[in-house]
Image (spheres, rainbow, N blue to C red):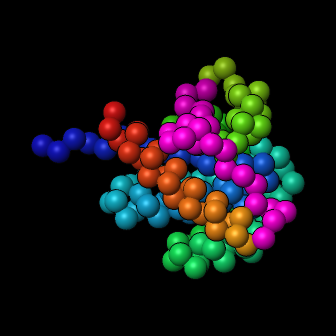
Amino acid sequence: MPEKQPELKVLVVCLGNICRSPMGEAVLADIAKKRGLNITVDSAGTAGYHVGEEPDERTVAVCKKHKVPINSTARQVKTSDFTQFTHILASDKNNLRDLERIKPANATAEVRLWGSYLDNEPVPDPYYGGTDGFEKVFQQVTNFSNAFLDTVLEK
């Protein structure tokens, strides 16, 4: 009998939830689907600057260019996320620190720097730069998504 795939519920987190994390959410969900995996993926921000907004147009454009469906509305991390998700992936050390600060005592999610599954690199915020920064983030979250899935599924 084939081994049952562990239930994965993943939250990708950046600061405002309009650039890195919605792109990460879309890419991770797309890669998982292509691998035939059934996982839940969402994204959120540690700050509430953009709650209710759609992703940055450059995030959407890069995802569309790579034929990755994206459909996200910005929201802020809430304490219930720490028990509703199995993994919370922080885009950089500042967001990881913020997540650790607000993590409730009953948290069950594994909270880690997303890059810790590959090279410990942060996902740089492309917001104040050009489209090339969004392209680099796309490549990085693609690599991180594959490394994350490879790691958690080999357990």
Q: Which quadrant does the C terminus fall into?
A: top left
Location of the N terminus (image quadrant): top left
Compared to residue 64, the image places residue 49 above or below, namely above
Could you say where residue 69 lies in the image, as x and y percent from the top left?
A: 54, 73
> At x 78% / y 48%, what residue is drawn?
15
Give the extent of the magenta segment: 107-130
Q: Is residue 114 magenta?
A: yes
Instruction: Name the residue nearer the viewer: 130 or 98.
Output: 130
- Is 104 contained in the magenta span? no
Question: In the rendered image, is residue 13 in sight?
Answer: no
> Residue 12, percent across and down?
62, 48
Q: Is residue 149 left or right of residue 60?
A: left
Prevailing secondary structure of the magenta residues? loop
* Residue 105 visible from this viewpoint: yes
* Identity of the residue furthest to the top in this view: 105
- Position of residue 47 in the picture relative to residue 108 (left or right): right
